[in-house]
Amino acid sequence: MAEPSKVIHVRNVGQEITENDLLQLFQSFGVITKLVMLRAKNQALIQMQDVATAVSALQFYENVQPNIRGRNVYVQFSSHQELAPMDQNQGRGDEPNRILLVTIHHVLYPMTVDVLHRVFSPHGSVEKIVTFQKSAGCQALIQYQSRQSAVTAKNALQGRNVYDGCCQLDIQFSNLDELQVNYNNDRSRDFTNPNLPTEQKGRPSQQPDAGNMYGSGARGGGLSHMANADAIAAAFGGNLPPGITGGNDRCTILVSNLNPDRIDEDKLFNLFSIYGNIVRIKLLRNKPDHALVQMGDGFQSELAVHFLKGALLFGKPIELNFSKHATILQGADTREYGNSNLNRFNRNAAKNYRYCCSPTWMIHLSTLPQDITEEDIVSLVEDHGVILNCKVFEMNGKKQALVQFENEEQATEALVCKHATSLSGSVVRISFSQLQNI
């Protein structure tokens, strides 16, 4: 590993990934001072406030595969100890810019768009505001109409408190060229476009409060609300995975762009049960490439949508959206899983939450026969892709295995087809592993 640096090197940054996506991936760990997109190389450089902040981010992502818009990205320390202006072909660093990056310390009162607008608008015309609410504080990006207004605001407000004794402003120039705002609500606002929707259809615009942070209670296939909240707290502490709000209360997912010739209810169960308990599944006969999946609660369905959107399954990138239907009505064309002992989250829920990730090229097999061999494992899954490596090992007296495929799609196919199959009297359990190599 390279020497620790406050500059983080990000690889596999696709053209669909924006600067805001990268900000959301890292801003929960601390202040981001510079961001440089290296589009020609599908890479980016991100400079954190200090080395300790960058170390915290990379330690977190050692255990959790970072994923943006369905694409796994890979992070490491950069060989640069600091990004100088010459390193930035489109960044500005300390050069004045009309967009300010504002960090609010010692937050005791809500830092909404309206509050920030009242603070910053006396110094010039504010066009856009985007906030990133966190349990320990808040960051915001504020775009002025002119660079001079931003300079004036920074000089006037740096180090000031919004309220007496709290909500201290730490202001830097952002190196972004333009803020992208999709919704006008308490967390983001485009003052030049008042016609934007308040939020995605069916999604409340207000921030989740402590009472509903982990979604609604289980509905027939999951943990009790309090037990689930305890498991989530044990798994993540106060920091949910980047991109997860914890505020979703919709349990049912509409899955589309499936391969109707290869998919069935059990295969969908095998995939979605990685992220929570499954209540029931329905294939839509009038739309053969669509299905509905009802999960135990809103938090589990949010994990599934976040980590699986765009994943390749049987040659097609699947699309996931929260359904307008709160539940799936029981009927002859639904498959019930609420009482299935294959639901993973009835036991060791906190551990299962920690293992949630986007599909990887490595699968982990457990509950194996004690006399299992690597040849047995290869025979089980070799129909689904090119196996680069396979290893059988023992942990706590039980045999387990790792299989590394050529890509994520092959590993996903092996998981959905072979999870819960019987091998010499043992029901094999398969999950994605976040290890990079065996």
Image (cartoon, grey):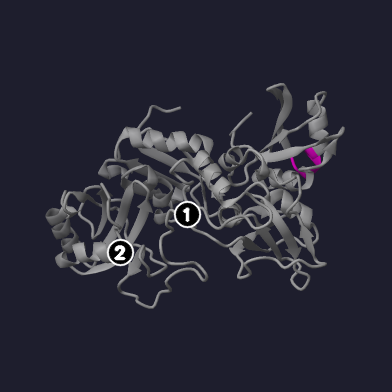
Q: Residue furthest right?
A: 424
Neighbours of disc 1 within 10 Å: few (<14), some (14-19), many (20+): some
**Answer yes or no: do the residues labelled 2 and 1 have beta carbons within 8 Å?**
no
Percent coordinates x, y for residue 8 in the rendering: 39, 39
Please give left or right for residue 171 compared with residue 178 in the image. Answer: left
Give the number of the disc on residue 213.
Answer: 1
Secondary structure, mark 1, is loop
Give the number of the disc on residue 31.
Answer: none
Q: Residue furthest bottom?
A: 195
Please give left or right for residue 61 compared with residue 285 in the image. Answer: left
Residue 375 position by quadrant: top right
Mark 2–mark 1 distance (CA, rounded to whole Å): 21 Å
Percent coordinates x, y for residue 194 in the rendering: 35, 77
Regarding residue 299, the answer to whether it shows in the image is yes
Upstream in sequence: badge 2 or badge 1: 2
Amino acid type, callout 1? Met
Location of residue 407 with respect to 109 vertically, above or below: above
Question: Residue at point 41% right, 38% down?
Answer: 57
Percent coordinates x, y for residue 247 in the rendering: 48, 57
Which corner quadrant holds the C terminus?
top right
Percent coordinates x, y for residue 250 in the rendering: 57, 62
Neighbours of disc 2 within 10 Å: few (<14), some (14-19), many (20+): many
Residue, disc 2? 113
Location of residue 79 with respect to 343 vertically, above or below: above
Q: Is 412 contained in the magenta span?
A: no
Q: Main secondary structure of the magenta part?
A: helix
- The magenta span reads 381-386
For the residue pair 185 and 189, the one nearer the viewer reads as 185
Amino acid type, callout 2? Val
Secondary structure, mark 2, is helix
